[in-house]
Image: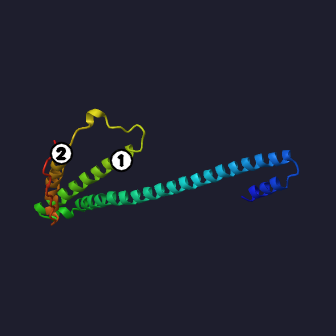
Amino acid sequence: VAFDVLILFMVLVAESSRERISNIVLLVFASLFGFFLIRSVLKEVEQTEQARKLLDMRSEFLTIASHQLKTPVTLIMGILSMMREGSLDKATVEERKNFIDGAYEKAVKLSDIIRDILFASDFDTKEFTIPENHLERVDVNAFLGKLHNDFKERAEKKGLVLLYENRAQNPCN
């Protein structure tokens, strides 16, 4: 801006028309250069801010993912440690079955989490596409009802009540 003011002053005090025109041309070029420079800097600041947000999201994801992975691994390791030390030998058959079932459920959960992470990592590749023959219409109400049925027993085992009410009057086909 200060440079533009200096050139404007030079235009005003120029002694000849030729000097005045060359100063006006210089003023226009300096103004355009300044405009594009500022626009470029603003774009760079915006891109830096976006990169920072992506890094924050990545950090949050890694924190959540590590917690989700540690929980089942810790339980599985605990049960295996008890088996190795012979502590489970002292338990009743029902207790041993519950421990082994718990370890199995956590192993399934761990496998699901890993599968989901790997599937999600495919989203950011340009090659990720869903083939047309894999797309199909879904009755959302039937899907939610199935989810409800699938998770109802798990919820009850944890002392929770899982409710789902299908309020649709015209189910999808």
| Residue 102, position as x, y percentages in the image | 20, 58
Q: Residue at x 72, y 48 (%)?
A: 28
What's under tag 1, amino acid-wise?
Answer: Ala
Q: Say which quadrant the N terminus sits in.
A: bottom right
Q: Where residue 20 is drawn, which disc sits there? A: none
User: What is the C-alpha distance between the residues marked 1 and 2?
Assistant: 24 Å
SS of the residue at dot 1?
helix
**Residue farthest along the top direction in this orientation:** 133
Q: Where residue 139 is drawn, which disc sits there? A: 2
Identify residue for label 1. Answer: 120
Q: Residue at x 82, y 49 (%)?
A: 20
Is residue 67 shown left or right of residue 136?
A: right
| Residue 133, position as x, y percentages in the image | 26, 33
Is residue 15 shown left or right of residue 76?
A: right
- Which of the two labelled residues, at mark 1 and mark 2, occupies the earlier sequence position? 1
What's under tag 2, amino acid-wise?
Answer: Asp
